[in-house]
Image (cartoon, rainbow, N blue to C red):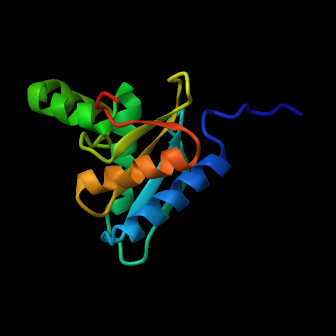
Amino acid sequence: MARYPTNGLTLAQANAIIAAALAKGRELNLLPLTVVVLDAGGQVKALQREDGASLLRPEIAEGKAKGALALGLGGRELARRAQSMQGFMNALSDLAGGKAVPVPGGVLACDASGLILGSVGISGDVSAQDEVCAVAGIEAAGLVPDTGDPA
């Protein structure tokens, strides 16, 4: 029987990312978070929404992850480009059906060589804190985060 290959992140890695990201959010006493993990093909691998998270948090988190994955750039770089290249970012949003959110909190998950395996989007608190949790989750899974800022 034919089988598909793993497309980037495994389910075990995605679940580890979510568990560590949510734990970091509780450690920092953040507002309820929603975490979305996309595989390298842009498909949702795992999603969890904490109790008390507001209505559109899954869509926002996915938009952060999708924007990063769509351009191969972390959310911080997307935010900078949104300021300097508004027309391009508007076109990107249109092409993505409104599902590209160019702000911190969308982080690429890479292997040690820099190969993009997927992305993580978190929404619930301020974007900078969402990003801290995404980084913690990616690192806990043994992967390298790319926030869009130089390491």
Quarter of image, res 50:
bottom left
| Extreme-right residue of the structure | 1
Q: Position of residue 40 (x, y in %)?
A: 54, 33
Quarter of image, res 151:
top left
Regarding residue 60, the answer to whether it shows in the image is no
Tell me if 89 is positioned left or right of 46 in this view: left
Q: Position of residue 28 (x, y in %)?
A: 34, 67
- Give the vertical position of 99 relative to 73 (above or below): below
Q: Position of residue 132 (x, y in %)?
A: 35, 52
- Give the vertical position of 36 relative to 143 (above or below): below
| Extreme-bottom residue of the structure | 52
Along the viewing direction, whichever of 39 and 15 lies nearer the viewer? 15
- Give the vertical position of 87 relative to 38 (above or below): above
Tag count? 0
Tell me if 25 is positioned left or right of 3 in this view: left
Q: Residue at x 25, y 53 (%)?
A: 127
Along the viewing direction, whichever of 88 and 80 lies nearer the viewer? 80
Question: Split into 4 quadrants, where in the image is the N terminus?
Answer: top right
Q: Residue at x 32, y 48 (%)?
A: 105
- Give the vertical position of 126 relative to 55 (above or below): above
Regarding residue 63, the answer to whether it shows in the image is yes
Quarter of image, res 67:
top left
Q: Position of residue 31 (x, y in %)?
A: 30, 71
Q: Residue at x 39, y 55 (%)?
A: 133
